[in-house]
Image (spheres, rainbow, N blue to C red):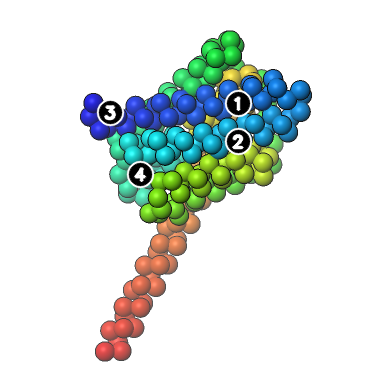
Amino acid sequence: MSAPRRALAAEFGGTATLLAIVIGSGVMGEKLSGGNTAIALLANALATGFGLYVLITTLGPISGAHFNPLVTLMQRLRGETTAAPWPGMLAAQFAGAIAGVVLAHAMFDLVLLQLSGKPRASVGLWISEIVATSGLLALIALSGKASLDSIAARVGGYIFAAYWFTASTSFANPAVTVARMFSDTFAGIAPASLPMFVGAQLVALLLVMGVLRATQSASNGDRKSTRLNSSHSL
């Protein structure tokens, strides 16, 4: 298999596994928590955080372990290359996410594809998605040349924390958000709530890109000024 095809397979499989973890741990947590939502959320957050660490360290060398259209788009907008053509990466992520939901439902003997009846609509939730997504994208962008283990730990730790400090429980990923619409379980989101969640995530991408470009321009200006000052001192 060629490298681009391996990358697309990794993005599909990794995103599918991520959604199986998110949905499956939500179902299991709700079943075993005896109605205690805090315990169910803790189980969901821990499984997702640890799952991300494993997936990123395992599949990172193959595809970059994006599992998130926003990460792929950010890389594209910054002029960086992807392991496979970026439209294919996006398609693999969305298809993988839905496949992961189906897999989770199959494991728990649930209807394979459902429509969620769980509304998530308020100004606070939309602000939370902007905050959660901005933090995730900034973390990835600023990690630079850190080791894969370090990046995986940072992403997994951040998502675990964001499950708790954001009112939205940090979807922060359009593919994840769309897929969770097809699960009427603990981690689901009603179709009517989807557009504003994805819109908030896209706003976060624009905000992060704007800040990155502004800081890069300022840094370039500082370096240019330093060079001019140095030449004048000769």
Query: Residue 179: horizontal and vertical position, in percent?
Result: 52, 24
Horizontal side of 14 relative to 39 (left or right) equals left
Q: Between residues 141 and 22, which one lies in front from this camera angle?
A: 22
**Residue at the right extreme of this rendering:** 35
SS class, disc 3: helix
For label 3, the crowd category at 10 Å Cα-Cα, with few meaning under 14, some 14 to 19 and many 20 or more, is some
What amino acid is found at the position of numbered circle 1 in the picture? Ser
Q: Which mark is residue 5?
A: 3
Where's residue 72, x and y in %?
39, 40
Left or right of residue 169: residue 62:
left
**Residue holding disc 4:** 76
**Mark sitting earlier along the chain (1/4):** 1
* Residue designated by label 1: 25
Residue 21: tell me if it is visible: yes
Instruction: Measure the alpha-carbon separation of dots 2 and 4.
Output: 30 Å
Q: Identify the image quadrant of residue 183.
A: top right
Image quarter where the C terminus lies is bottom left
- In the picture as drawn, the residue positioned furthest to the bottom comes out as 234
Query: Residue 138: x and y, percent?
Result: 49, 51
Marks 3 and 1 in Cβ contact (< 8 Å): no
SS at mark 1 in the image? helix
Q: Residue at x 42, y 67 (%)?
A: 218
Q: CA distance from mark 4 to mark 3?
A: 18 Å
Type of the residue with mark 4: Arg
Q: Amino acid at mark 2?
A: Leu
Q: Is residue 91 visible?
A: no
Chain-order first, disc 2 or disc 4: 2
Pointer 1 and pointer 2: residues touching (CB < 8 Å)?
yes
The alpha-carbon separation of the residues under discs 1 and 4 comes to: 32 Å
Check disc 4 and report its element: helix, strand or loop. Answer: helix
